[in-house]
Image (cartoon, rainbow, N blue to C red):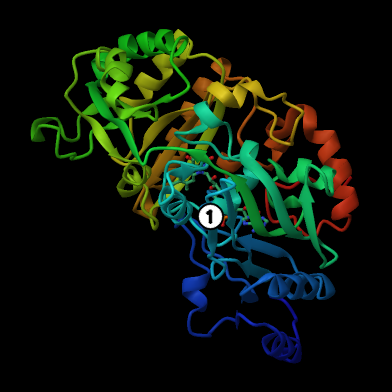
Amino acid sequence: MSNLPSSAIDDLKAAARGQVLTPGDAGYDDARKIWNAMIDRRPAVIIRCAGAADVCKAVNFSREHNLIVAVRGGGHNIAGTAVCDDGVMIDMTPMRSVRINPWSATAYVEPGVTLADVDGEAQAFGLAVPLGVNSTTGVAGLTLGGGFGWLSRRYGMTIDNLLSVDIVTADGTLQHASEQENPDLFWAIRGGGGNFGVVTLFEFKLHPVGPIIYGGLVVLPLDQARDALVKYRTELQTMPDELAVWAVLRLAPPLPFLPPAVHGKPMVAFAICYTGDPQDGPAAVDAIRKLGTPYGEHLGPMPYTAWQKAFDPLLTPGARNYWKSHNIETLQDGLIDVLVNAVESLPSPQCEIFLGCIGGATMRVPPTAMAYPHRSTQFAMNVHGRWDDHKDDANCIAWSRKVFQDAKPYSQGGVYVNFMTEEESGRVGAAYGPNFDRLVEVKKRYDPGNLFRHNQNIRPV
Ligand SMILES: Cc1cc2nc3c(=O)[nH]c(=O)nc-3n(C[C@H](O)[C@H](O)[C@H](O)COP(=O)(O)OP(=O)(O)OC[C@H]3O[C@@H](n4cnc5c(N)ncnc54)[C@H](O)[C@@H]3O)c2cc1C
């Protein structure tokens, strides 16, 4: 436990505009809860920041009292970096403003917002920025690790659309970082996670999207998965950037368009989002419909904001989660075999394997242009170990690790930092590849004491 004098907490409470919570306070337990129920940590202090001034105070307080700092955005990080034991949790969730400037197609986004907040505001003007595929994810953590989703093949990673940030660095000062101002800091935060400070404002470039897109799901029996994935691999070579198709292998959920007899049966689903003219949608997705003879399909025009929420019911907070991830350049036959075999031995009905297709525009940026280096990655392959009962921990973790190991020979060796799990600090080098040494230099300059280390840590040595 920390030895914080109560007078220090009283001073902080008097100085802060937002709430300051300590163990026993009403709201403390709710504030320390995050998406992954495997994580149960008790900070000494939670500062629920109302603005940048509170963030400066929180950073100074942590440094002066020599306390570890955890920064919380949407609380989705699988490794649970948003909450620490005994230290200070800087909780950004009260800072939830999104301002869209439709004339310049830019968005000013505070760090407590979720994807749904940004999508909702931007879509009112027919605009969007590439974000992830689960609307309750925090924009802050997603962006700082890189960020990709349905729009990335067309418009790049989230960081490819980041114009500037306001950020409180370890010395407690607020800085502006962009290509023109503090460019080394701006380079580092585009993929370098929370290593360099606490972002208090993001400025994004927006693009015309929807508001109606064409998309949905095509669900095939697992015994067609090998064939279908090989055909999918071929289709990808000529797919337009407007079309994003991800694959997921799991047991069929009770979706209304699937006959009840196939609920719970092993399957591969292709999730499709076409952002070109919706009238061209049926032709654009035709080849994907013909990958096999489906159990069922549900395709059509729908609001982009609805598609952004389509996977929320499968990714609700409160379950136990253990994920393992590889970056993949090509879906080799051997990998396809590993994935299909893995679904034949699922330890829980919620476990699944996701092939998140990045590709397209994300590959047309040099790997050293910003901290995120994985510009030759076609897929982030994610083994989602997910279950409810702690008695299943060992079984589900062992399954995830085995699939990860079996898939390793077919991977690129790199990993998306935002999918790294708690005990994977040894993979930080793999997450940054050719950019690691430069990141260490920037870290030495902006955080020489490693105040921001409760993350996938880039050490200043
Ligand atoms: C269900 C689910 C779906 C996902 N889907 C996608 C997806 O489609 N695409 C994708 O790219 N990723 C996806 N992710 C991964 C996601 O990008 C990471 O989990 C990310 O860390 C979430 O950000 P957050 O703000 O919610 O997390 P938090 O846990 O709140 O924060 C994670 C870390 O980010 C840093 N951080 C957060 N806010 C700040 C800030 N203001 N300043 C400085 N550092 C900060 C801190 O180090 C913090 O510990 C998904 C995750 C989940 C759980």
* 48 displayed left or right of 198: left
Identify the residue at the far front of this view.
Answer: 103
- Mark 1 C-beta closer than 8 Å to ligand 1: no
Find residue 235 and report its image quarter: top left
Q: Quadrant of residue 275?
A: top left
Q: Residue 350: which quarter of the image?
A: top left
**Helix, strand or loop at disc 1?**
strand
Residue positioned 64% across, 51% down in the render: 203
Give the vertical position of 145 relative to 238 (above or below): below
Count of numbered circles on the image: 1
In the image, residue 200 lies at what x, y percent? 67, 62
Which percent across, then down, holds residue 85? 63, 67
Q: What percent of the width, then of the height, locates residue 148?
A: 53, 36
Which residue was labeled with disc 1? 100
**395 is higher (above) or lower (below) than 92:** above
Looking at the rendering, in which quadrant would you find the C terminus?
top right
Q: Nearer the viewer, residue 436 or 166?
A: 166
For the N terminus, the image quarter is bottom right
Q: Position of residue 205 (x, y in %)?
A: 60, 43
Identify the residue shown where x is 64% and y is 21%: 364
Q: Nearer the viewer, residue 344 or 235?
A: 235
Q: Give the residue displayed 36% in from the left and 20% down from the top.
A: 341
How dense is the environment of label 1, judged by Cα within 10 Å: few (below 14), some, or many (20 and up)? Answer: many
What's the residue at 49%, 74% (across, down)? Answer: 29
The amino acid pointed to by label 1 is: Ile
